Structures are given as structure tokens and as C-alpha cells.
Image: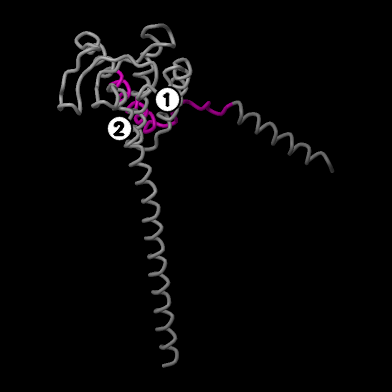
Amino acid sequence: MTTQPRRRRAAAVSAWVEQGTTETPRTLVDSPAQLRRFLLAFAVAASAVLIDQGTKTLALTYLSEHERIPLLGDALGLQLAFNPGTVMSFGADATWVLTVVATAASVALLVAASRAHTVGWAVAIGLLWGGAVGNLLDRLLAPPGFGRGHVTDFLAYGNLFIGNLADVVLGAGVALSLLLSLSNRQVPRSSSQRETAAGRWTGDAHGVAASERGQAHEG
């Protein structure tokens, strides 16, 4: 009496083991469409890094720390600066911490790029990724030493602070992410409203049909 249940359990265990051993391992991207979005994010990030590092090289070659070249009067100009911290020199005494945080953020954005569900999000993540890596390279490779490097800045915003194109790219990525988040919140609402309206219309139609059938029976 107990032989068949045991055989069934053994067969179930064998099937479970076989399924586990033959299952295709997960990869960073699981579909061709997802791979295309990842490559788009990578292309955006790589372009941002190349442009950022190229403009920093030009700034190191042609600009001075003691002279500002005006572009839009006093509002925007070109002036060389070296920043051990973040925007407006925050965290200037914690360069190592900023390097670790930037490294972790770059890895997290790599994973996020592999999971981007739309082209818009792939572009936004690529911008964030490129901006983060652009400044991270300075922290890793620039003087005074590995992990303690000062970020090269050259875009002078009045008397507020001096930044670089990596900062601009980061800002663009944040702005696009906010726009996408807001649009994603509005789409479900409109969809639910359409479904509610359709449900009401269907209910009204059924009610009218039932009323007409009732009148027909009475007649």
C-alpha cells in the first residue's frame, strides 16, 4: 500500500532535480530586446565618458586656475579648478569615501542598465552611468593619488561653483528619470479611468437591454 506513494515521491524528486540541473542559467540580460536597451545605455554612457574626459583634457591644456574666460558674461565662464569633493566642494575631506560611493553607484547603474524596460529609461540610466564613471575616473587616476584624485572642473557658474560636463550629464539623467517616473504614474491612472468608464458603459448597456426585454415580456 505504501509502495506507490513512495514511488511517486521519488519520481517527483527526480523530476525536480533534473529540472534544476538542466535549467538555463540566468544572464545579465534575458532577451534580445533587453540586450538592445542595455547596449543603448552603454553607448550613451561611453559617449558621455569620452566627451567628459576629452573636455577635461582640453581644460588642463588651455585653461588656468587664475583666469576666467567669460562665455555668458559673469553667469557662465571657463576656469580650471580641481575639486576633491562633490558639487560646491561638499565632502572635500572625504575623497576616499566619495570614491567608494561612486564605485558602488557605477556598479549599481550597470545592473540597472541591464534591467531597463524602455528606451527612455535606458537613455536616462546611460546618462547617470556616464556621469558617474566620468568623475570616478578622475578620483581613481588623477593626482594626488589612486582613490584620492581631484576631479577636474572648468565650467564656472557665476560665483556659485565650478563643474564639468559629467555633472551636466548627471543632471540631465536625473531630470529625465523624474520625467519618466511622473509619466509612468500618470499612465496607470488614465488606463484605470478608461477601464472604469468602459465598465460603466457595459453595465449601462446591459441594464438597457434587460429593461427592453422586460418591456417586451410585459407586452
Is label 2 in a helix, a strand or a loop? helix
Which image quarter holds the C terminus?
bottom left
What color scheme is it? one colour
Which image quarter holds the N terminus?
top right
Is residue 46 rendered magenta in the image? yes
The mark that comes first in sequence, 1 or 2, is 1
Query: Residue at position x 74%, y 37% from top?
Result: 9
Is label 1 in a helix, a strand or a loop? helix
Query: Residue at position x 33%, y 28% from top?
Result: 170
Along the line of sight, the residue nearer the viewer: 79 or 130: 79
Query: Residue at position x 44%, y 11% from top?
Result: 147
Q: Label 1: few (<14), some or many (≥20) within 10 Å?
A: some
In the figure, residue 149 lies in which quadrant? top left
Q: Label 2: few (<14), some or many (≥20) within 10 Å?
A: some
In the figure, residue 209 lies in which quadrant? bottom left
- The residue pinned by badge 1 equals 110
Query: Residue 117: image x %, image y %?
Result: 39, 37
Q: How far, Cα to Cα, is label 1 from label 2? A: 18 Å
Instruction: Name the residue furthest bottom.
Output: 219
- Nearest to the eye among marks 1 and 2: give it: 2
Q: Which mark is residue 172?
A: 2
Q: Amino acid at mark 2?
A: Ala
Query: Residue 8: image x %, image y %?
Result: 73, 39
Along the line of sight, the residue nearer the viewer: 31 or 12: 31
Q: Which residues are magenta?
A: 22-49
Query: Residue 102: image x %, image y %?
Result: 43, 21
Along the line of sight, the residue nearer the viewer: 52 or 10: 52
Q: Amino acid at mark 1?
A: Leu
Query: Residue 158: image x %, image y %?
Result: 23, 27
* 93 displayed left or right of 79: right
Q: Does 213 appear above or below 96?
A: below
